[in-house]
Image (spheres, helix red, strand yellow):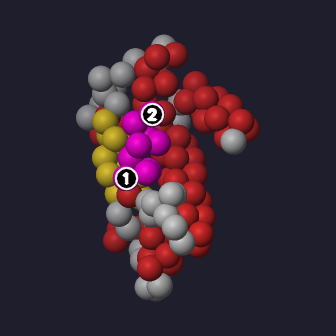
Amino acid sequence: MTTVASKLVLAVAGLVASVTGFAATADADAPSVAVRYDDLNLSTTSGVDRLYQRISAAARQVCPDVHARDPHVALAGQHCVSTAVARAVSEVNSPSLAMLHAARVSRG
């Protein structure tokens, strides 16, 4: 795996800004976090599971609180997390990761 491919950046554009009432920001201004996976073997189930956990944790880190008291903030947070995870999974371009994500999404 190359150094470039060893990092994944989750960009959450406009979602955080819309929750706080500010104008939508460009992707470059959106909160993001690098998710390393150069230490994982994506040809194994455990490697794919671990990467999915990392992506999900990173999305929760940069998105609004999904457990907020304000239902609008909580809903925006849920949407943000699901969008960020889907985008990250797509960027990794791993069929195994995509299948895991599809299974998790279908279960809710």
- In the drawing, what numbered circle is on residue 53? 2
| Dot 2: element | helix
Secondary structure mainly formed by the magenta segment:
helix
Q: Give 108 or 101, whichever is nearer the viewer.
A: 108
Q: Which residue is mark 1?
A: 61
Locate residue 32 relative to residue 53 in the image: left or right.
left
Position of residue 92 measured from the top left corner of the image (x, y, whole percent)? 47, 38
Q: Which residue occupies 61% across, 29% down?
A: 100
Identity of the residue furthest to the right in this view: 106
Instruction: Find out whether residue 57 is within the magenta segment.
Output: yes
- Residue 12 in picture, x, y percent from top left: 45, 62
Residue at the (40%, 18%) spot, across then down: 41
The residue sitting at 48% across, 24% down in the picture is 48
Work out which quarter of the rendered image holds the C terminus and state it.
top right
Can residue 54 be seen in this snapshot? Answer: yes
Q: In the image, which residues are magenta? A: 53-61
